[in-house]
Image: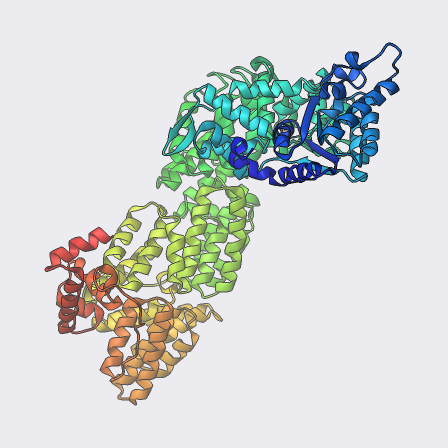
Amino acid sequence: MAEQFGKAWHDRDREWSALTAALTALSGGAGGVVLVEGEPGAGRSRLLAEAVAAAGEHGVVACSARADELTQWTPLAPLADALGATVWALARPDDTPMRLSARLLGEIEDRARRAPQLIVLDDVQWADPMMLAALQSFAGHLRDSPVTWLLARRDGTEQGPNGAAAARLFDRLAEAGAVRLRLGPLSGEAAAALAGEVLDAPPGDDLAALIAEAGGNPALLVALAEGWREEDAVRVRDGRARAVTERLPARLIEAVRDRLSGFSADTVGVLEVAAVLGRTFHAADVAELLGRTAAGIASAVREVVCSGVLTGGAAVAEGGELSFRCTLFQRAIGETIPASVRTALHRQAGLLLLGRGLDARESAVDHLLSGALPGDTQAVRALATAAGRVVDTEPAAAASIAEKALALTSAGDAEVPGLAVTRAAALLRTGHFDEATELISATLVQSPPPEAAARLRTIAASIQVLTGRGTQAAAELDADGDAETRAVRLAALSGTEAGVALAETSADQAGAVGAVARQLLADREWSGGRVAESLRLSRSAAACPVPELAGVPLPHPALVLAGRLAQLGEFEQAGTVLADIAARVGQAGHVPLDAAVRVTRARLALWAGRLEDAVDAARGADGVSGAQAVLGEVALRRGELGEADEHIRRYRELTGHDAVTRTWLELQLASARLDPADVLVLLGTERPGPPLLLHPAAAGWLVRTALAAGDTGLAGSVVAEAADLAAGNPGCAPLAAAAAHAAGLFRGKAGKLREAVAAHGHGWARASAAEDLAGLLADENKPAAEVVRELDTALETYQSAGAVHDVARVRSKLRAAGVRRRHWTYAERPVSGWGSLTDTERDVAELVAQGLTNRQVAARMFVSPHTVHAHLGRIFRKLGVNSRVELTGLRFQVA
């Protein structure tokens, strides 16, 4: 038996053990009853045949027979067949059924005296009433005889009179002590093993997915696998059987037809419609497609539920869902339906389900796409409606639906412009700008109705703004157009006098126009250093729903608000605002806005000093200018100047970069390479003011750099501007801290610097103030302990902010003060190769690979050239190289 069933038989171990135990007991003279039940194809007949084959090994005589639709009209026929005779041969002219029954009982008793008897009867659900009564009577009468009855019935036959009686017989025999076995579906592992034995190779992933759809039914599995083999539909590659076609094999379709033949024509019709609807469906939908009532199909539904084909029988009366137990069976039923009928049913189902609401939308669209033909106006309009409903919430789905609907149209059809608008809007929201632009151009050439043309031009303008051609786009839009057109036009004018003037007259409007106007005014207030008013306007603008701003080419005001709150050190508030807008954007499926969310998340992490988190978030939006700015500043903090230079270059080249952010990054990069005086050249002739000085560290950094360059005029100007900003924004701690930091540096006031250290909410700015305070204390010959205390504060804060370059500088100052702080950790390292380098050696190697000389590396790492030379010697030995050129080549190989 194990050889025949292979690994799949392990799923029948329990059943086979029970049969083996019954045969063993029978060979010892103890009879009994074993009942076997299961759905069609579950392996009942095979199990019975194996039991008959094994009987001889136990010294048992086995006989078997099967009832069927024909034998149910002849009393006791299957039992007589099992005993090796026909009813007519056993009967006598004056026999009554009772006498014939007694004669059969006597025959069994005679046989049992000679040897233990195993009597196997399959498909008992077809047995006639006389035979069912005899089985119950015989089982009790022969209880003490060496006779074992092995009876099997099929699930789902309880609706017929004989089937119901057979089910009652099994219940009564079980109550009397019979062993009852239910054959459930094979496990996934056993199903794959069974199919693999038929195919002579374990199934690959594609076949495994289909095998799983068989629901563990052995008959379907065998039909599927044998069908593949017969049709040469699989190939063995890399030891796995893989499909070469998606078509279901004919043998499987035929097996399903055979199974359907057991149902009435009415039930088959219900199943066919249900199969077209899908794996899960509502009985009411089946009834409506058939032009009947739910009550009218209830009997057919009950029949297939009882058979095990469907699950969820209780749902029929409640209007709930029904499901095919086996997906493969459902698909195969669909294949039995003529193609033209199947197509018509899909179309009918699609139109029906669209009326069920959004929950059924996806299924309805799938049906329509399977059933609609080119020129089907009703289907095209239904698809257009479905796409329009989800363009703001599921733009990717809307784009796909509209595309497929357009494929069913011809040029000049009335539905084309509306579908083009929907698809273009969806493509804008999913970031497919080129596709949207191409579609818009092709549609405008066809002279669509004015309203559709205006909408298409608005979408095109949004794309132009997002790709850096905003002013041109604004000039082409109708100033008196709909709300979205006016909002896009206003956003396109951002940063211009005309835009500000228009924003002032539009700020009181509701919806997208008012939100854009208030955000533009908030930007103006921020640039002027009026922080409170800027935040007020941003908060008001941020209340605008995402869908209303989905087509407007600007970051959602909530994202701007979150970024600015973080810049002011209000990290908790910023996080709350970002979490809310991120959830709303995620629900909308808006790709450009999602990228903006990632950039804002990266900025918040950067401001909070979580550099790794900032990098992770920024890399998720690598093509957006703001992400390059974040990556550039992280690289600066870490002293990775080559990477910083590349990110800043890309930031300059990408559309939508912020001039103030670019200036700050370029100043930081230049300060790592140039003398202070050369760095300040980048500022030009204009004196720094807001919004540059709204950066928490900018005022202190600019004063420090100006003083180092000998430009006291610039330093004094920054101090005055920072003081004015703080005074104009009372209660704004970051601006007060920045003003104190600048004044303390310029005037040499340790108290002011201490005030800045205490008030700064940003780690890097606080560390800078502590480092400046330590320098001032050292210049004033204050006790070394005071200097070291401030340097330790700077060191700890730089470390927590991940500012590796600044940490190295402060360590150098601590060494100069006679203090060494342990900063290494012991770790298991290989003795050679890149992984063998210590952190310091790796930093030296990185800088040398960038082309720096030993003296330049020493200055960057705040150590002596001799120390760099010593490190370089160890690096060469560990890496097995002999020159800086070889080191550079090896470094790029590792990268």
Q: Position of residue 24 (x, y in %)?
A: 67, 39
Residue at position x 59%, y 17% from top?
336
Q: Quadrant of residue 643?
A: bottom left
Residue 224 is left or right of residue 878, and the answer is right
Q: Quadrant of residue 876?
A: bottom left
Asked whether the viewer can see residue 633, the reply is yes
Residue 710 is left or right of residue 272, and the answer is left
Residue 883 is left or right of residue 814, and the answer is left
Q: In this orientation, which residue lies closer to the viewer: 231 or 818?
A: 231
Q: Residue furthest left?
A: 882
> From what the image shows, is residue 228 above or below residue 694?
above
Residue 18 is left or right of residue 241, and the answer is right
Asked whether the viewer can see residue 477, the reply is no
Q: In this orientation, which residue lies closer to the viewer: 516 or 266?
A: 266
Q: Position of residue 477 (x, y in %)?
A: 44, 34
Residue at position x 30%, y 77% from top?
822
Residue at position x 42%, y 77% from top?
758
> From what the image shows, is residue 22 above or below residue 770?
above
Q: Quadrant of residue 498?
A: top left
